[in-house]
Image (cartoon, rainbow, N blue to C red):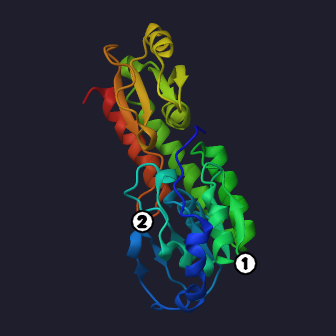
């Protein structure tokens, strides 16, 4: 993953907040969805309390069968590591059983330390390839004690992937796999489409040398990462750019990420 700008309030600044967190943690209703401060939490009467740094980790937890899930970075934030933590985020972590984070979100450990939480810190591999997604859902299901729910979701996911793949392949221009250039973290979309990847780039911005090399391979489409986009990747090349979203929305529906990408590619490939 690329180097990212991480914003974190120094531990000294949040220490003063810690004393009041224990009192705040237990407050709130017993049902419904709390979407204050950009976080979403489905409240249930049993199961572990899971706090995820972003909707991506939260969606994986939900897929694995967790029912009490909250995420910190609002779904409207395009690049999660740029998020500036708030006191309410520390409150959420203070009452968690598990805190899920990605390797490029190093402040996850700092907020756990800042509030003295006893939560188990779990690093999640954020990769939308089917193998990685199924593996993470299975692993989280084992941690949460929800293995059956995780297995059911994985079965549903596999069927959905196969169906979407057939739909996209049915829209191949001229019945042939299209040539694409793909950002490193959107190659899963190329896999879903059965496309021919003629080059990859990123996550850093494309250099002039890379631009020349990628353009020479004449991709018909560019699969850009919406959540790390730096603008038009191959200007003047004639390639159509599709901005692929990796993160789920507020509903934490991970399958919606695949459906959206499939719809984008099907429409582009068919020329409609």
Q: In the displayed structure, does residue 188 sit left or right of residue 147?
A: left
Q: Nearer the viewer, residue 263 or 77?
A: 77
Which quadrant is the N terminus positioned in? top right
* Res. 56 mark: none
Residue drawn at 46 percent across, 47 percent down: 258
- Percent across and percent down for residue 198 are 53, 17
Is there any visible trace of residue 33 in the rendered image? yes
Residue drawn at 43 percent across, 11 percent down: 215
- Percent across and percent down for residue 48 are 65, 79
- Percent across and percent down for residue 89 are 51, 72
Q: Which residue is mark 1?
A: 118
10 Å crowding of disc 2: few (<14), some (14-19), many (20+): few
10 Å crowding of disc 1: few (<14), some (14-19), many (20+): some
Q: Nearer the viewer, residue 12 or 6?
A: 12
Which quadrant is the C terminus positioned in? top left
Q: Is residue 251 above or below residue 88?
A: above
- Percent across and percent down for residue 144 are 70, 72
Q: Which residue is mark 2?
A: 251
Residue drawn at 41 percent across, 20 percent down: 175
N-terminal of the pair, mark 2 or mark 1, is 1
Location of residue 155 by image quarter:
bottom right
Pair 2/1: label in front: 1
Element under disc 2 = loop
């Amino acid at each position: 993953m690329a180097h990212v700008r991480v914003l974190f309030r120094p531990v000294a600044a949040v220490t003063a907040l810690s004393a009041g967190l224990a009192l705040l943690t237990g407050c709130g209703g017993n049902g419904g969805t709390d979407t204050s401060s950009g976080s979403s939490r489905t409240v249930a009467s049993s199961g572990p309390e899971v706090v995820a740094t972003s909707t991506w980790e939260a969606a994986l937890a939900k897929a694995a069968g967790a029912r009490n899930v909250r995420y910190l970075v609002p779904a409207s934030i395009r690049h999660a590591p740029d998020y500036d933590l708030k006191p309410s985020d520390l409150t959420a972590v203070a009452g968690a059983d598990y805190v899920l984070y990605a390797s490029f979100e190093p402040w996850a450990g700092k907020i756990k330390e800042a509030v003295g939480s006893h939560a188990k810190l779990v690093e999640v591999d954020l990769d939308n390839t089917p193998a990685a997604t199924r593996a993470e859902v299975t692993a989280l299901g084992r941690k949460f004690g929800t293995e059956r729910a995780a297995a059911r979701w994985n079965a549903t996911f596999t069927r959905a992937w196969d169906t979407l793949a057939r739909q996209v392949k049915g829209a191949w221009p001229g019945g042939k796999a299209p040539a694409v250039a793909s950002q490193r973290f959107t190659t899963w979309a190329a896999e879903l489409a059965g496309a021919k990847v003629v080059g990859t780039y990123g996550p850093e911005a494309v250099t002039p040398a890379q631009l020349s090399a990628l353009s020479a391979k004449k991709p018909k489409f560019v699969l850009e990462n919406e959540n790390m986009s730096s603008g038009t990747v191959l200007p003047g090349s004639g390639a159509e750019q599709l901005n692929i979203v990796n993160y789920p929305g507020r509903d934490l529906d991970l399958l919606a990420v695949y459906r959206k990408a499939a719809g984008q590619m099907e429409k582009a490939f068919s020329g409609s």
